[in-house]
Amino acid sequence: MEKSPPHTQDQNGPAERSGGVIIGRGRAMKNTANLPEILWPEILTCAAYLLNRSPTKSLNWETPMGYLERLSGNQDSQPSLNHLVPYGCRAYSFIKKQPKLDRLEPRAHIGYLVGYVSTNVFRIWILSQKTVVETRDVVFDITKRYDPQDDQLYVALEILEIL
């Protein structure tokens, strides 16, 4: 083990650089999607997910996931990108276990896409519940994004319910 000199930054160039790339991409995603600051862990996780599926010049324009698959013996494997939708778009997440007698109650939560778990499981930030859920049953509206005014609307509705 080599120790760094006192009062100097650790000399761990490649790891520091890859962290900088993820933070830069996450910053761009946050600004484009207009999401609040509290979702930074979700944003950075999604940035890393997308970075692993993006072609890289150092790998001869191959994706990191495709490169690893090729090393493991699968020569024609490239990660699927069919499930990707614009980051931060509005998502309607199906409410499971809704009683059948509540016919006039909503059947979906309104949320926003904040990440991916796999090719058919998404991470959705449900604004009304202030939580992130993993779901497969979701419909996306790619024309709408998060608006901070929506946050104030839910606070007003909560106050009306209390009164």
Image: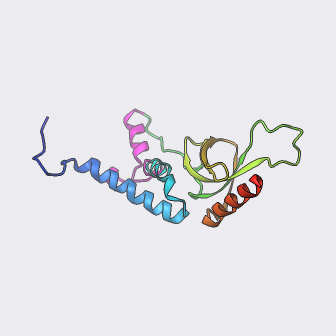
Q: What's drawn in magenta, residue-wise?
A: 50-73
Q: Residue furthest front?
A: 163
Above or below, 121 against 162 in this view is: above
In the rendered structure, the answer to whether residue 150 lies left or right of residue 114 reads right
Residue 88 image offset from top left, x and y in percent: 58, 58
Quadrant holding the C terminus: bottom right
In the rendered structure, the answer to whether residue 158 lies left or right of residue 99 reads left
- Is residue 114 among the parts visible in the rendering? yes
Quadrant holding the N terminus: top left
Residue 12 image offset from top left, x and y in percent: 22, 47
- Colour convention: rainbow
- Is residue 120 among the parts visible in the rendering? no
Q: Which residue occupies the foreground of this view, 81 or 30?
A: 30
The residue positioned 80% from the left and 39% from the top of the image is 98
The residue positioned 65% from the left and 41% from the top of the image is 135
In the rendered structure, the answer to whether residue 59 lies left or right of residue 5 reads right
In the rendered structure, the answer to whether residue 61 lies left or right of residue 111 reads left
Residue 133 image offset from top left, x and y in percent: 61, 43
The residue positioned 52% from the left and 65% from the top of the image is 32
Asked if residue 27 lies in the magenta stretch, the reply is no
Q: Residue furthest left?
A: 5
Q: Which residue occupies the foreground of this view, 75 or 13?
A: 13
Figure disc tally: 0
Q: Which residue occupies the foreground of this view, 38 or 31?
A: 38
Residue 60 image offset from top left, x and y in percent: 34, 52
Asked if residue 61 lies in the magenta stretch, the reply is yes
The residue positioned 69% from the left and 58% from the top of the image is 154
